[in-house]
Amino acid sequence: RVTVDLMINEAVNDRPHVSADDYADGAVGYIRLTGFSDTGADTFIEAVQAALDKGQTKLILDLRGNPGGFVTAARSVASTFIKDGPVFWEEDAQGNLTPTEAGITHSDGSVTKGIATDPKIQLAVLIDRGSASASEIVAGALQDSGRATLIGATSSGKGQVQQGSDLGDTGAGQ
């Protein structure tokens, strides 16, 4: 038997998760979201606001190849377009369903309503086999609420929420 001590450093991935562009001579806003972090959700909302400030009422949300991320960020992204009601439901091991209501949780902890909930704002969501987890939650919520049309290939099929648990001093390796 060999004992090995490991030092694990927690790092924050600060790569940008949001990019934006304009199409059709500026009439259509395009926003690509490559991951779901809480700061990425705030940046996404800023990109949507910038599109709205330009007078764009037709938006494309590109979630192709997006592997997911934080469920809190998924709630915020979907809630940008969903005015109220459940955005998604979580089912526990016993089959109990818990709704997660629309609302944008900002990095400072404040919660607000979406900025693009007006039905005049049209939304298309691009997905593919690489769209997983939080991407599927957002795409499904926007489709189910009638806020978006999905375009592309069938997503990966994960569509699950995973939550970490603090193991305290009794965790593995202790």
Image (cartoon, rainbow, N blue to C red):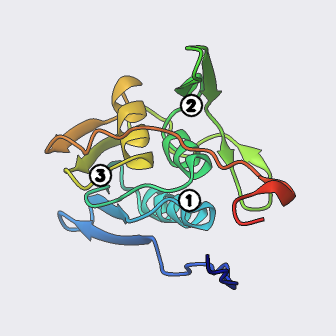
Query: Image height check: is 116 above or below 30?
Result: above
In the depicted view, which residue is nearer to us: 124 or 133?
133
Mark-to-mark CA distance, 1 and 2: 17 Å
Query: Image height check: is 47 above or below 124?
Result: below
In the depicted view, which residue is nearer to us: 59 or 129?
129
At label 1, the amino acid type is Ala
Classify residue 50 as left or right of residue 121.
right
In the depicted view, which residue is nearer to us: 161 or 89?
161
Q: If you read the primary sequence from the N terminus, does the residue marked by circle 1 or circle 3 appear first?
A: 1
Label at residue 83: 2
The x and y percentages for residue 39 are 62, 67
Furthest toward the front, the residue is 1
Element at label 1: helix
At label 3, the amino acid type is Ser
Classify residue 169 as left or right of residue 22.
right
Residue 33 seen in this snapshot: yes
**Residue in the image at 47% along x and 35% along y:** 118
Q: If you read the primary sequence from the N terminus, does the residue marked by circle 1 or circle 2 appear first?
A: 1
**Residue in the image at 42% along x and 32% along y:** 141
Label at residue 41: 1
Camera-nearest label, 1 or 3:
3
**Tag 1 near tag 2, CB within 8 Å:** no
Mark-to-mark CA distance, 1 and 3: 17 Å
At label 2, the amino acid type is Lys
The x and y percentages for residue 94 are 59, 15
